[in-house]
Image (cartoon, helix red, strand yellow):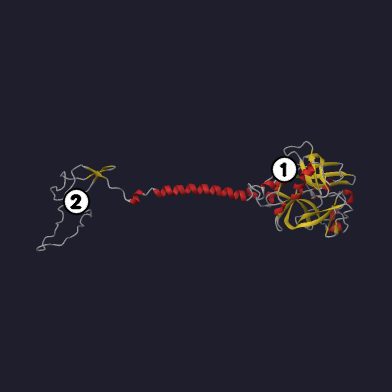
Amino acid sequence: MTESQRPSGEYPMYPSYGNGDAAYPPPPAHQPAQPISTGPGTTVWPGSGAGHGGGDGYGSFGQGLPQPAPQPSGHKRRAKRPVALLAAVAVAAAVVGGVTATAVGQFTGTGSSGTDSSSVVSGTTVSQSSAGTVAGVAKAVSPTIVEIGATSTAGESTGSGVIITSDGEIVTNNHVIAGASSIKVTLSTGRTYTAKVVGTDADKDLALIDLEGASGLKTATLGDSSGIKVGDQVVAIGSPEGLTGTVTSGIVSALNRDVTVAKDSEDGQGQGQQGGGSDWPFEFGGRQFNGDTGNSTTTYKAIQTDASLNPGNSGGALINMNGEIIGINSAMYNASSSGGSSSSGAGSVGLGFAIPVNTLKADLDTLRAGNGS
């Protein structure tokens, strides 16, 4: 009969027959033999007989005959699987985490500006640690903004400009260099270059000048002004009152403002900021500000900002928080100068205007060809 595998001392009692004094079957006289493990895959069952029906009345296998080792239970066989599974999950999580970090970096400004790459001229970028801050924008873009000094028969004027190529192409306002007999440009490092006019477009109040003998300059990134919204934070950098690299900040106050400015310096009272003269005159809503605009004028759609602009900011940059140029600062309202006082007693009242950068990008080929209105 088959051996019971119950632990020692636990044997079932069976119904008795006859006089009830003896139970069938009787309990074993000694503890059943236990298997002896001799090595992986082999089990020896002790016993004296070579077959069933040994001397103890209970069949046992022959002494030393190897029998198949009992297979480990299912839970033991799977014991190592969770460890392997956890390791695989950890590796997968690390890979996904790396991809996620890359994607986040791309969409927060470290690798991509958030605008169509085809519309952006490669140049400065804001570091990831400083993304979205005025300090980060100022650090990244300030080296690309220059001070322009123009000398003409009307005197000397100061304006600003933006470097767009490493060999010294600079964008500014037409009214900053109009009629100039000589132009000197000072970089943020203090180094000075002589510049020549490449092309002008008085209708758009834009001009392109080129530094003589320049190379290896840091360049600005021209962004996309079509995506800006009222309320967007912006930074302005320029040289108001000859203070090179001045940084101010604010928001986009309005879009598509019709601003009218004089085409030539002879029609107005200054270029950028005239020594001893008034601010660059402009017209808005049928009224003239900061002086007479003269007879020859042009009107364009402008970005309005409350970032502080002062005489000398003309031609400088209006910048989004990704460090991209979205406008060329061109006009500002000055209540004091409109009343007839000198520019030295005037200041910004938070009404500034900039030419959208998309207008500039559409005009670059014309300016480089030396053509314009």
Label 2 element class:
loop
Residue 116 placed where, x, y %?
A: 67, 49
Residue 302 found in image quarter: bottom right
> Pointer 1: what residue?
219
Is 316 or 348 nearer to us in this picture?
Answer: 316
Instruction: Count up the numbered dots.
Output: 2
The residue at the point 78 percent across, 36 percent down is 213
Residue lying at the far bottom of the rendered structure: 19
Tell me, yes or no, whether the two marked residues, 1 and 2, touch with CB atoms within 8 Å: no
Q: Amino acid at mark 2?
A: Pro
Answer yes or no: is residue 32 visible.
Answer: yes
> Pointer 2: what residue?
32
State the mark number for residue 275. none
Label 2 neighbourhood size at 10 Å, few (<14), some (14-19), many (20+)? some
User: Which numbered disc, 1 or 2, marks the residue that appears first in the sequence?
Assistant: 2
Answer yes or no: is residue 279 visible.
Answer: no
Is 103 or 271 nearer to us in this picture?
Answer: 103
Residue 91 placed where, x, y %?
A: 48, 46
* Side of 354 where 323 appears, left or right: left
The residue at the point 72 percent across, 52 percent down is 225
Q: What is the distance, in whole Å, between disc 1 and disc 2 at their CAs?
A: 93 Å
* Side of 95 where 277 appears, left or right: right
Q: Amino acid at mark 1?
A: Thr
Label 1 element class:
loop
Residue 246 placed where, x, y %?
A: 76, 49
Label 1 neighbourhood size at 10 Å, few (<14), some (14-19), many (20+)? many
